[in-house]
Image (cartoon, rainbow, N blue to C red):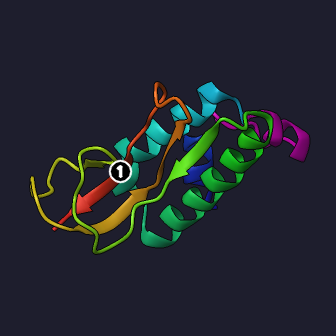
């Protein structure tokens, strides 16, 4: 991860050592990371966005090990836009198919802590 992206997420993730990084995987930090990436995704090239998604996936999996009631909501390119599982980018069409997945969402089993996948619709 380049230094500007790493610095941008420094308030959410502690990268001083591996244990501190894993301890960053709290429910609040997962939420903040998701929101920040959703708001700032245009600031990153595709490679950096891919790495940030990998970091989120890793942290979420670690979080899920201690919070087994949570799961991912995986969006698939080409599937129909669905308000139940997707939030669209501001410049997306209001209807259509998923053109790009910015970041996959997550939920708890009861559904009261649902964060929809953030996608571009075309």
**Residue 113, placed above or below residue 122:** above
Q: Residue at x 46, y 24 (%)?
A: 112
Relative to 84, 35 lies left or right:
right
Q: Residue furthest left?
A: 94
* Residue 43: image location, x then y, percent: 38, 54
Which secondary structure class fits the magenta region best?
A: loop
The residue segment tinted magenta is: 10-24
Front residue of 97 and 110: 110
The quarter of the image holding the N terminus is bottom right
Q: Residue at x 56, y 34 (%)?
A: 108
Relative to 62, 31 lies left or right:
left
* 15 magenta-colored: yes
* Residue highlighted by disc 1: 118
Image quadrant where residue 114 sits: top left
Number of on-image labels: 1
Image quadrant where residue 52 sits: bottom right
Front residue of 57 and 112: 112
Q: Residue at x 66, y 46 (%)?
A: 60
Front residue of 36 and 101: 101
């Amino acid at each position: 991860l380049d230094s500007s992206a790493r610095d941008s997420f420094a308030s959410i993730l502690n990268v001083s050592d591996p244990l501190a990084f894993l301890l960053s995987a709290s429910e609040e930090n997962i939420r903040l990371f998701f929101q920040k990436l959703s708001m700032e995704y245009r600031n990153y090239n595709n490679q950096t966005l891919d790495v940030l998604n990998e970091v989120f996936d890793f942290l979420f999996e670690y979080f899920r090990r201690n919070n087994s009631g949570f799961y991912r909501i995986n969006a698939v390119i080409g599937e129909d836009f669905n308000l139940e599982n997707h939030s669209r980018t501001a410049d997306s069409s209001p209807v259509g198919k998923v053109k790009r997945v910015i970041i996959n969402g997550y939920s708890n089993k009861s559904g009261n802590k649902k964060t929809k996948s953030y996608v571009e619709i075309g």
